């Protein structure tokens, strides 16, 4: 059920974020509509409004169609079907949204050519830029969330790894949020008017204060993560600290989205607009721009890879290749495996897909058959966990780390203590008992 809740929640979040993205790019912001540079004096043009409103209508229809689809995951029978549904919904929704967005961008740029629209105003408020920079968050405020996490290094547990993974997750999320804050701070200042006071006030409020809000949220997450790391170190089998952390992260991200949406509602008129249209639905492409990462115009707050540069092109297409490889591997990792037990004169060979183990008879200190799986508190370190079976490296409360090959259709399991702990069985109690008897006969023959 936890697995279902995670992927359903993730799917809802993705759909809502795409909806939010469309609302952002159809508003005039920093000289752009639909990643197309438009002078501020044409934002009320009827044709431009018609193009953006049409995209909003199409997006609204898709949103209503796709929003209920994540619920299908709850009635799917297997993990593979659930993940394929997850991938299918995201992929199809993203493709359709990009098709409609691309159509609207082409229409807008065609209209721009027909009207011969060019920016004829070039204005820079350099004095305001200096004042705005002074009001950005300090460098110490950027690194403070990471400093808060440092005591967590004393609570790392490389055996069970729960506290270690907790701390690593927090560090990665912190770095992502700090990077997001820096992107906001480094974004071009919007020139709202020829009055310096207005430019300073609005940019500090929309950039500096927003960045501070994100950094304060990151600081709070660091404190929660540190407490969660300590609690996970003391009780690595409890999911409560992780659940609390996820709830805080989700609520915080929702507040960030709401706050950014409120900022975007303001009349963003940039008097310093004089750029070519290098953006498309795939990101950014400009051979003359030496930057590899540039602020995105279609995904507010994110960065686009510059496909015009050789390195950027390699990263872009390499990421696509990795994504295709990942999705193609899902059937392999999310379908049941048959455990193979081979007996040789001096050892037992156990295998399941990528996992292989050898147990030498001379290393066996203890071997016994248990009437039921030993313990409910189990953590997967690495491996596969399906409705029908678990296999790979796990940690079990009261035993420690084990190599697990467990069919859930059988209550009985075989426990071996050798060079490490092993728990395994067959699909039925009868077959498990026969496997145990064979091990005993081979060890003591």
Image (cartoon, helix red, strand yellow):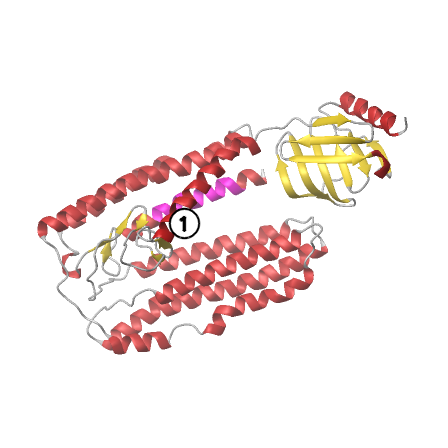
Give the x, y percent position of residue 434: 81, 22
87 drawn magenta: no
- Along the horizontal axis of the image, is 189 left or right of 228? left
Q: From where the camera sits, is residue 374 visible?
A: no
What residue do we see at 34% from left, 71% from top? Answer: 204
Q: From where the camera sits, is residue 217 visible?
A: yes
Residues in magenta? Answer: 6-20
Dividing the picture into quadrants, the one containing residue 376 is top right
Give the x, y percent position of residue 379: 67, 44
- Along the horizontal axis of the image, is 365 left or right of 166? right
Of residues 347 and 412, the one drawn nearer to the viewer in this rendering: 347
Magenta segment main secondary structure: helix
Of residues 336 and 317, the one drawn nearer to the viewer in this rendering: 317
**Residue occupying the far left of the picture:** 115
What residue do we see at 42% from left, 45% from top? Answer: 318
What residue do we see at 54% from left, 61% from top? Answer: 221
Q: Pointer 1: what residue?
A: 315
**Relative to 172, residue 407 above or below:** above
């Amino acid at each position: 059920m936890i697995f279902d809740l995670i992927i359903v929640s993730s799917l809802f979040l993705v759909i809502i974020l795409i909806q939010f993205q469309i609302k952002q790019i159809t508003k005039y912001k920093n000289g752009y509509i639909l990643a197309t540079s438009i002078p501020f004096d044409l934002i009320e043009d009827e044709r431009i409004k018609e193009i953006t409103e049409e995209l909003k209508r199409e997006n609204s229809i898709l949103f209503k169609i796709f929003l209920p689809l994540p619920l299908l995951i709850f009635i799917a029978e297997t993990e593979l079907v659930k993940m394929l549904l997850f991938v299918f919904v995201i992929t199809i929704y993203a493709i359709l949204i990009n098709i409609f967005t691309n159509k609207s961008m082409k229409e807008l740029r065609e209209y721009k050519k027909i009207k011969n629209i060019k920016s004829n105003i070039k204005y820079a408020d350099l004095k305001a830029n200096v004042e705005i920079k002074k009001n950005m968050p300090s460098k110490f405020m950027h690194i403070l969330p990471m400093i808060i996490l440092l005591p967590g290094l004393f609570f790392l547990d490389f055996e069970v790894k729960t506290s270690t993974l907790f701390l690593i997750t927090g560090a990665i999320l912190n770095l992502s949020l700090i990077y997001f804050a820096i992107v906001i701070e480094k974004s071009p200042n919007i020139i709202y008017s020829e009055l310096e006071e207005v430019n300073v006030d609005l940019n500090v409020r929309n950039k500096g204060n927003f960045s501070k809000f994100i950094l304060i949220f990151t600081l709070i997450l660091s404190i929660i993560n540190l407490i969660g790391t300590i609690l996970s170190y003391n009780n690595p089998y409890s999911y409560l600290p992780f659940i609390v952390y996820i709830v805080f992260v989700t609520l915080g991200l929702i507040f960030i989205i709401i706050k950014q949406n409120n900022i975007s509602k303001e009349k963003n008129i940039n008097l310093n607009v004089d750029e070519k249209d290098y953006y498309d639905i795939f990101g950014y492409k400009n051979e003359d721009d030496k930057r590899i990462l540039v602020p995105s115009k279609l995904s507010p707050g994110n960065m686009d890879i510059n496909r015009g540069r050789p390195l950027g092109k390699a990263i872009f297409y390499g990421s696509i290749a990795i994504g295709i490889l990942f999705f193609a591997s899902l059937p392999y990792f999310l379908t049941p495996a048959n455990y193979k037990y081979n007996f040789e004169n001096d050892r037992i060979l156990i295998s399941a897909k990528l996992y292989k183990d050898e147990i030498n008879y001379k290393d066996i200190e203890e071997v016994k058959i248990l009437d039921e799986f030993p313990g409910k508190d189990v953590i997967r370190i690495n491996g596969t966990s399906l409705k029908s079976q678990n296999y790979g490296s796990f940690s079990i409360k009261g035993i420690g780390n084990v190599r697990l090959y467990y069919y859930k259709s059988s209550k009985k399991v075989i426990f071996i203590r050798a060079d490490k702990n092993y728990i395994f069985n067959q699909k039925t109690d009868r077959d498990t008992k026969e496997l145990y008897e064979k091990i005993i006969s081979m060890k003591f023959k």
